[in-house]
Image (spheres, helix red, strand yellow):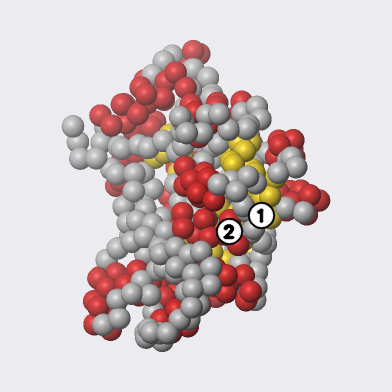
């Protein structure tokens, strides 16, 4: 079997190594001044004027804190896509709230706003939309619906750092917006996340939640110091981002525009190569404003395992994003609406390799393997698009 083209390859190099060494040499390894600088630089990059940013140790932590600041409480309901990763659901149930599953659209694999409207009930507190693969969902429709029903919106933008909508980056405006900087995202802090919020008051609450409910901790640690006299003013968690992780994140943020441009180019090459192949459906975007986290295709459900095995034999690894959450044991009895698009898409979708600054030889290997599958699977007249 040939060497495998992996689905993910983190874009680390000498700049990341230097960032780690510099952070170690500073001698303050926990949350500190570098964490604060990373938060400020994220806000500047997003153009989030007047919208504070809080860095966390993971994207899941960011989602959990955002839900708390949004006022979600035990017994409340949060509308979420079943076509999603379990992190969103665990953040909701960690509070004691209930996820309510809603269907998606085929064109962007994000919320179908009409279906969301049908699921709003007396216990609904918030809507949690996902920008899948970095492709924006109908976020304008979500906010219009939320305003009509006085609901909070927590955007899961963990796939979408750097994506814009009509020239405005996701996170620059809106309600609460969460990002992830885990090892395979467009930029990484090895692990990490962020919440963009609306006010200094919300930031203050987020800071208390982030570090064990301690009142003076953030202000002192941002000076690379500790306060030995403090109060505990709320429930809290150990969700802070260290100087080490923030330093890595800053080194990645310096290069994010190049990362995104290279990923867009590869995605466009894939789309051009696959668009006319029978039995292969490609993302419905030109990627002009998309910061692509993953690239996916859809194949007929009864051919997906064959497709995956075919590519593996030609040195191309694949992934599946996502398994539908309503089928998991822990979530199968939660309230949900009809999910026909979710079930169809989840049975067809396959993730292909996408890396920042992906070598042409690797992307060409992926392209040729997919083309060969389309040529050899079945006679042309017997194949159909998913």
The answer to whether mark 1 and mark 2 are in CB contact below 8 A is no
Asked whether, in this view, residue 34 is left or right of residue 316, the answer is right
Q: Nearer the viewer, residue 318 or 121?
A: 121
The structure residue drawn at horizontal position 45% and vertical position 29%, both measured from the top left corner, is 329
Residue 205 at what x, y percent from top left?
57, 70
Secondary structure under the numbered disc 2 in the rendered image: helix
Secondary structure under the numbered disc 1 in the rendered image: strand
The structure residue drawn at horizontal position 50% and vertical position 59%, both measured from the top left corner, is 62
Give the quarter of the figure containing the N terminus.
Answer: top left
* Vertical placement of residue 280 versus 3, above or below: above
Asked whether, in this view, residue 200 is left or right of residue 143, the answer is left
* Vertical placement of residue 252 versus 284, above or below: below
Residue 250 at what x, y percent from top left?
40, 73
Q: Nearer the viewer, residue 223 or 377?
A: 223
- Residue with the mark numbered 2: 68
Asked whether, in this view, residue 351 is left or right of residue 107, the answer is left
Q: CA distance from mark 1 to mark 2?
A: 12 Å
- Residue with the mark numbered 1: 153
């Amino acid at each position: 079997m040939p060497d495998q083209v992996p689905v993910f390859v983190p874009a680390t190099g000498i700049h990341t190594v230097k960032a780690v060494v510099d952070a170690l040499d500073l001698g303050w390894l926990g949350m500190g001044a570098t964490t604060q600088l990373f938060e400020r630089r994220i806000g500047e990059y997003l153009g989030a004027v007047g919208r504070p940013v809080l860095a966390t140790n993971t994207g899941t932590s960011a989602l959990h804190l955002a839900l708390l600041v949004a006022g979600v409480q035990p017994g409340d309901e949060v509308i979420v896509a079943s076509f999603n990763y379990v992190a969103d659901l665990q953040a909701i149930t960690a509070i004691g709230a209930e996820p309510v599953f809603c269907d998606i659209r085929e064109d962007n694999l994000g919320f179908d706003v009409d279906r969301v409207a049908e699921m709003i009930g007396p216990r609904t507190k918030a809507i949690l939309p996902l920008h899948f693969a970095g492709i924006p969902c109908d976020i304008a429709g979500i906010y219009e619906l939320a305003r009509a029903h006085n609901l909070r919106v927590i955007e899961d933008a963990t796939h979408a750092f750097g994506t814009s909508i009509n020239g405005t980056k996701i996170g620059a405006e809106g309600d609460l917006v969460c990002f992830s900087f885990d090892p395979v995202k467009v930029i990484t802090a090895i692990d990490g996340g962020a919440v963009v919020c609306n006010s200094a008051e919300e930031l203050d609450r987020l800071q208390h939640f982030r570090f064990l409910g301690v009142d003076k901790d953030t202000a002192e640690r941002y000076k690379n110091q500790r306060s030995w006299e403090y109060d505990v003013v709320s429930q809290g968690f150990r969700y802070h981002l260290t100087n080490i992780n923030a330093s890595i994140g800053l080194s990645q943020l310096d290069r994010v525009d190049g990362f995104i441009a290279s990923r867009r180019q590869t995605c466009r090459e894939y789309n051009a190569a696959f668009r006319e192949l029978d039995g292969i459906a490609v993302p419905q975007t030109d990627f002009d404003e998309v910061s692509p986290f993953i690239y996916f295709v859809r194949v007929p459900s009864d051919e997906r395992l064959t497709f995956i095995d075919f590519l593996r034999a030609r040195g191309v690894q694949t992934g599946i994003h996502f398994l539908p959450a309503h089928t998991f044991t822990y979530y199968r009895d939660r309230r949900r609406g009809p999910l026909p698009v979710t079930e169809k898409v989840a049975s067809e979708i396959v993730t292909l390799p996408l890396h920042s600054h992906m070598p042409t030889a690797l992307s060409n290997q992926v392209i040729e393997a997919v083309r060969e599958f389309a040529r050899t699977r079945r006679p042309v007249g017997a194949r159909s698009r998913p």
